[in-house]
Amino acid sequence: MAGRDIRVAYAGAVAATTVIGLLSFSVFVLAQVFGGSEDDSPPPVAVQPVVTPSTTPASTTAGWVEKPATIVGVRVGKKNPRALVMVVALPVGAPGCARGLDTRIVTETDTGLTVETRLSTMRSGCDVVSRTIAATAREPLGDRRLVINGEAWTRNAKGGYRRCTPTCE
């Protein structure tokens, strides 16, 4: 009977640890997307607009492939209304998972911004963590629509942004 009690206690401990881990990760992601009590985002990266975006994966050195980063959340900077803060799903855990995370504003108009956020990778099966990266627009973001890596985003009622699926209406 004692062996069974130990297995039950062990299973309970594993389940509790899993639930705590999932809750902690969820709180982390929500804090990154909607902001915490302090402005812990990295300083905005000053970017220069360019005319022609490249949205197809491009080969880089020694097997590395450049591709669009996966965006999981978007918000306006807390202290800078021109800062666009993006939460990226970044592959980690082994050499070759990811390098060169970078963002740039491709075009900026009165009604919207087109942004590219890219990274290079040479392997799959990596763990994923959330990281923030920022770009600074010339003017405050206001209610302008965004196109990030070819996907449309629009302001939501909470002041952040939501992905348009399938439309922004």
Image (cartoon, rainbow, N blue to C red):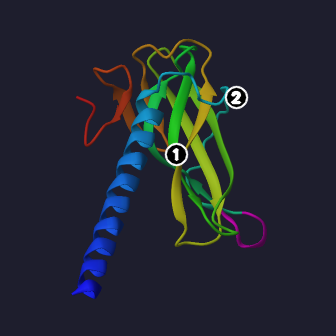
Q: CA distance from mark 2 to mark 1?
A: 18 Å
Q: In what element is the residue under mark 1?
A: strand
Q: Is residue 114 left or right of residue 145?
A: right
Mark 1: few/some/many CA within 10 Å (<14, 14-19, 20+): many
Camera-side residue of 146 and 81 = 81
Circle 1 residue: 88
Amino acid residing under circle 2: Val
Circle 2 residue: 47
Please state the horizontal and vertical placement of residue 3, each as a whole percent of the image: 29, 87
Q: Quadrant of residue 138?
A: top right
Mark 2: few/some/many CA within 10 Å (<14, 14-19, 20+): some
- What residue appears at the point 63 percent right and 53 percent down from the top-left corner? 119
Segment colored magenta = 60-65
Q: Is residue 24 left or right of residue 84?
A: left
Q: Quadrant of residue 21?
A: bottom left
In this rendering, the count of numbered labels is 2
Quarter placement of the N terminus: bottom left
Looking at this view, name the residue that lies furthest to the right: 61
Does residue 43 lie above or below 3 as drawn? above
Looking at this view, name the residue that lies furthest to the front: 2
- What residue appears at the point 57 percent right and 21 percent down from the top-left corner? 83
